[in-house]
């Protein structure tokens, strides 16, 4: 059956033929007859076609209406809700007056496709979902679809007021920010009352102005903590502006080249202000655990981080170390045995920390204690071999051996990491009920939640430094010379021989280890390379290229001790003029790895975190599966660009 509207030009064509026939009558009667016959035949064909088209429309509409009961017909006739009937090809067969008012300015809609009238919505999806929310000319409708054999009926229920009320409700839901003045303690310690008052007033005035821009409520809850009550609609704006308040606070200078900083935790999408505040405090703890000078937003699930461009402020609190040491000692005495574990591909800081703890627990507390480590993949083989030569006791065990002795009375101490995905054995972690974490890396969102003790100091130079602080309060028996050198080698590794991330605590820890007999030359010998490793390091340095003040080198294939070689190459590249950060990209263990280093101007942790890794402001890394070296370098360029644009 024909279902196309007849083009008016066909009627014009028939009329032109009749005119031509009349014109030819004066000079050729046979031609006149022929042209007249053609014109009449054409006109008849056009009329019949047009009649068939009208019949199609009539039949389709009748089919649509006849498919309904008598009550349905009456309902459609008087329905105040916009309604439309669609036929073959989803073309409009019928619509009521409310539907016509729904689309002002539209001429006849009959036999036109419905798609342009409701763009982005397919009829099939409407039918399958039964009800769909759409927007037309600024109003919101719920579309109900009913499909028969040959027709589809759409009803448009106006719920504009409901949608607007719903949006207003969602936009005015509570969101709470808890703000922490990062370096208030430093100000009180190092400056007089006038300087302290001036800086604090500037910080608080900036925070009050910031809250006022959003119409938020600002409350000071303690000398270094504030609460700001936002609404949900403010979260989007805060995110888009990337928390410019962090830059405003950082512009407040005091002393010599020092800036004020704050950390901000925001909780939202919770049922009450109290619940939002609880989330905000968790987000704030995450910020402080990552070095401060940043903001974090959470809804109880994922975290979004902003800022974190500064090095942060070192905290110095021996009281906390004493308390942690006391509680840890009691935990050890209550356990039947202790297992110390670090991260995969353990380094000198990881193994050195474990050895320092082992020595104190073994001599001063007397509880059976072991260190579980994978000797084949460890980057501290020299230290492990040397320590085994110096003691007759069984110190190092495999993860399988650790699993055999682990039970509900085992205390598991994890050093130099707090991320389960990086543990030497995640299975061992899940097998133990009592967990202690000692770590200095910036906090990640996948940290351990069931730790009985979580000793986390992101401003410490190394885990070895933290362990050195603890063991001074854990017994009267001093550690041995080799144990002290193990700890010192860990500090030297992570500080690049006391160049990076050193503070008062770092040198005090080193002084204590020296007092215990540690020899710096012997400790440095733990970092020694063989000739092949040294040559590979030089080849990586020679292959480096500079991209926006960042040195990037790579290895196309793996090589012996590639992890150590790559990290040392990145360290060497930092001492090239004009280089703010260095990256070594290399394949290892079926993944592409990146070792990142900086001297402080570039926060490599943010770059590595964006690529799925993490670490410190000046030392970080990541591992990427299912890719290649060139692709990783391109992504590295992109993340450097992003960090530069945000900074």
Image (cartoon, rainbow, N blue to C red):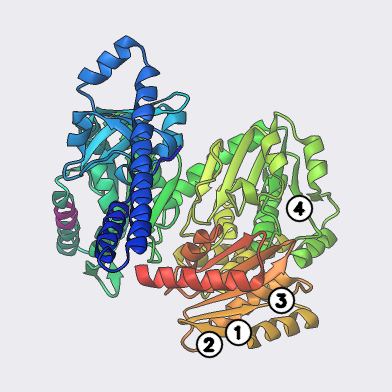
Residue beneath the point at 49% across and 63% down = 605
User: In whole angstroms, how far apart are the C-alphas of marks 1 and 2?
Assistant: 11 Å
Q: Is mark 2 on a helix, strand or loop?
A: loop
Residue occupied by mark 1? 544
Q: Residue 446 carries which label?
A: none
Task: Using the rendered image of the protein, determine whether residue 475 is visible from the camera's viewpoint.
Answer: no
Q: Name the residue under label 2.
A: 576
Q: From the viewer's side, name the closer residue of 48 and 162.
A: 48
Per the image, the residue denoted by label 3 is 556
Residue count near mark 4 (Cα–Cα under 10 Å), binned few <14, some 14–19, many ≥20: many
- Label 2 or label 4, whichever comes before in sequence order: 4
Q: Can residue 159 be seen in this view?
A: yes
Closer-to-camera residue (451/505): 451
Residue 115 percent across, percent down from the top left: 36, 44
Eye-nearest disc, 3 or 1: 3
Give the magenta-colored segment's residue range: 204-210
Q: Is mark 4 on a helix, strand or loop?
A: loop
The image shows residue 444 at horizontal and vertical percentages of 51, 50
């Amino acid at each position: 059956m024909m279902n196309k509207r007849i083009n008016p030009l066909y009627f014009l064509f028939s009329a032109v033929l009749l005119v031509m026939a009349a014109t030819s009558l004066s000079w050729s009667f046979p031609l006149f007859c022929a042209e007249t016959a053609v014109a009449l035949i054409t006109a008849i064909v056009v009329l019949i076609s047009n009649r068939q088209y009208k019949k199609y429309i009539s039949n389709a509409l009748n089919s649509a209406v006849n498919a309904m009961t008598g009550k349905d017909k009456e309902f459609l006739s008087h329905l105040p809700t916009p309604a439309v009937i669609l036929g073959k090809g989803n073309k409009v067969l019928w619509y009521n007056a409310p539907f016509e008012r729904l689309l002002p300015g539209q001429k006849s809609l009959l036999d036109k496709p419905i798609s342009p009238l409701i763009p982005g919505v397919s009829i099939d999806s409407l039918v399958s979902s039964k009800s769909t929310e759409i927007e037309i000319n600024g109003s919101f409708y719920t579309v109900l679809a009913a499909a028969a054999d040959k027709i589809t009926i759409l009803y448009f229920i106006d719920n504009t007021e409901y949608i607007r009320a719903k949006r207003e409700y969602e936009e005015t839901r509570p969101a709470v920010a808890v703000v922490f003045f990062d370096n208030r303690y430093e100000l009180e310690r190092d400056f007089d009352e006038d300087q302290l008052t001036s800086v604090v007033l500037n910080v608080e005035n900036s925070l009050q102005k910031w809250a006022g821009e959003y119409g938020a409520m600002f409350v000071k809850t303690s000398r270094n903590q504030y609460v700001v009550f936002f609404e949900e609609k403010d979260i989007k704006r805060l995110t888009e502006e990337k928390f410019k308040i962090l830059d405003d606070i950082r512009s407040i200078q005091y002393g010599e080249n020092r800036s004020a900083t704050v950390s901000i935790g925001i909780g939202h999408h919770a049922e009450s202000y109290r619940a939002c505040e609880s989330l905000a405090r968790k987000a704030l703890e995450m910020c402080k655990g990552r070095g401060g000078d940043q903001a974090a937003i959470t809804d109880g699930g994922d975290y979004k981080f902003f800022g974190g461009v500064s090095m942060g402020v070192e905290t110095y609190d021996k009281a906390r170390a004493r308390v942690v040491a006391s509680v840890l000692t009691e935990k050890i005495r209550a356990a039947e045995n202790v297992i110390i574990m670090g991260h995969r591909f353990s380094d000198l800081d990881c193994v050195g920390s474990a050895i320092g703890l082992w020595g104190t627990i073994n001599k001063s507390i007397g509880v059976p204690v072991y260190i579980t480590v994978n000797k084949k993949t460890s980057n501290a083989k020299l230290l492990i071999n040397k320590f085994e030569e110096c003691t007759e006791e069984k110190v190092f065990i495999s993860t399988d051996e650790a699993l055999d002795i682990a039970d509900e009375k085992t205390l598991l101490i994890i050093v130099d990491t707090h991320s389960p995905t990086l543990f030497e054995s995640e299975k061992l972690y899940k097998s133990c009920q009592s967990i202690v974490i000692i770590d200095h890396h910036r906090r990640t969102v996948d940290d351990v939640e069931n730790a009985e003790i979580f000793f986390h100091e992101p401003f410490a130079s190394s885990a070895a430094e933290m362990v050195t602080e603890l063991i001074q309060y854990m017994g009267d028996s001093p550690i041995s010379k080799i144990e002290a050198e193990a700890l010192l080698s860990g500090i030297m590794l992570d500080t690049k021989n006391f160049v990076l991330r050193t503070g008062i605590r770092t040198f005090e820890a080193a002084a204590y280890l020296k007092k215990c007999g540690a020899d710096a030359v012997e400790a440095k010998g733990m970092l020694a390379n063989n000739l092949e490793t040294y040559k590979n390091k030089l080849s990586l340095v020679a292959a480096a290229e500079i991209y926006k003040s960042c040195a990037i080198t790579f290895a196309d294939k793996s090589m012996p001790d590639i992890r150590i070689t790559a990290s040392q190459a990145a360290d060497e590249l930092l001492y090239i003029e004009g280089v703010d950060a260095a990256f070594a990209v290399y394949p290892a263990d079926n993944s592409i790895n990146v070792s990142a280093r900086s001297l402080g101007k570039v926060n490599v942790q943010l770059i590595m975190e964006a690529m799925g890794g993490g670490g410190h402001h000046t030392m970080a890394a990541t591992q990427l599966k299912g890719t290649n070296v060139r692709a990783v370098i391109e992504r590295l360029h992109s993340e450097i660009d992003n960090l530069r644009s945000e900074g």
